Image (tube, rainbow, N blue to C red):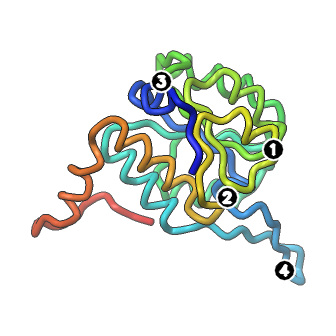
Amino acid sequence: MYFAPDARERARRVRFLIFDVDGVLTDGGIYTGEKGEFMKPFHVRDGLGIRIWQNEGGGTAIITGRDSAIVSFRAEELKIRDVFLGHIDKRAAYAALKEKHGLADEEIAYIGDDLVDLPVMAQAGFPAAPADAVAEVRQYAALVTEAEGGRGAVREMVEFLLKAQGRWEDVVARFLSPERLENISQ
C-alpha cells in the first residue's frame, strides 16, 4: 500500500465515499454470455466494507461511465442510493452529490482507476486508486491500495479511512460481540 504523507490527516475529514465501478468495484472485465447478457464480478469484502462504512454513518455513491442493470442491482443490494450511470464526464454527478448532501470536497473520498476518473479525483479531498489503476491515476492518489480493482481495493480504502479516524477497533469489537449483527450484507 502506498499513501501520501498527508493521507491520514486527509482521511480524518472524509464522511462520504464515491466509487467508480469497472476496475474498482469489479476487476474491469466485462463478461458476456452466449445470448449477449453482461456479467460483472463483485468482491464480497468490498461489499462488507461498504456496509461497514454506511453503518458507521458514512454516505456512499456510485458514478460510472457505463449504464448497467447489474450495477443498479448491486447498488440496491448494498443500499447505495445515489447511483449515476452512463456518466463518462463525472463532474456534473460529483457536483450534484456535493449539493444534495451538503458536502465540501475535503469530506469526499473518490476511488477510480482510469483517466476518466482524474477530473473528480482532482476535486475530492481524498483521491484513491486500486493497485492496478493506470499510472497517471496512481500518481494522483493519496492512497494506492495493495489490492487490485474488484479484489478488495474498496475494503482496503474503508479500513484505512476508519483507522485514520480512530474507529476501526470499535468496528472489529462489534463483530466480536455476542449480540446479533444487523444491517450487514456483502
Q: Position of residue 167 (x, y in %)?
A: 27, 42
Residues at marks 4 and 2 touching, judged by CB atoms closer than 8 Å: no
Which numbered disc, 1 or 3, marks the residue that appears first in the sequence? 3
Element class at badge 2? loop
**For discs 2 and 1, the disc positioned in front in the rendered view:** 1
* Of the image marks 3 and 4, the number of the one nearer the N terminus: 4
Q: Are marks 3 and 2 in contact (CB under 8 Å)?
A: no
Dot 4 amino acid type:
Gly
Which tag, 4 or 2, sits closer to the chain's start? 4
Front: mark 4 or 2: 2
Is residue 153 among the parts visible in the rendering? yes
Q: Is residue 15 visible?
A: no
What residue sits right under mark 3 in the picture? 107
Residue 10 to residue 26: above or below: above
Disc marking residue 149? 2
Picture layout, residue 138 above or below residue 172: above
Q: Which residue is mark 4?
A: 33
Quarter of the image where one finds residue 109? top right
Please tell me whether mark 1 sits on a helix, a strand or a loop. Answer: helix
10 Å crowding of disc 3: few (<14), some (14-19), many (20+) = some
Q: Earlier in the sequence, mark 3 or mark 2?
A: 3
The amino acid marked with disc number 1 is: Ala
Q: Amino acid at mark 3?
A: Glu
The reply to whether discs 2 and 1 touch (Cβ–Cβ < 8 Å) is no
Q: Which residue is mark 1?
A: 135
Q: Secondary structure at mark 3?
A: helix
Q: Dot 2: few (<14), some (14–19), or many (≥20) neighbours within 10 Å? A: many
Percent x, y for residue 110? 60, 36
Tell which tag, 3 or 4, sits nearer the viewer: 3
Rendered view: 29 above or below 112: below
User: Compared to 84, does 73 lie above or below?
Assistant: below
Q: Residue furthest left?
A: 178
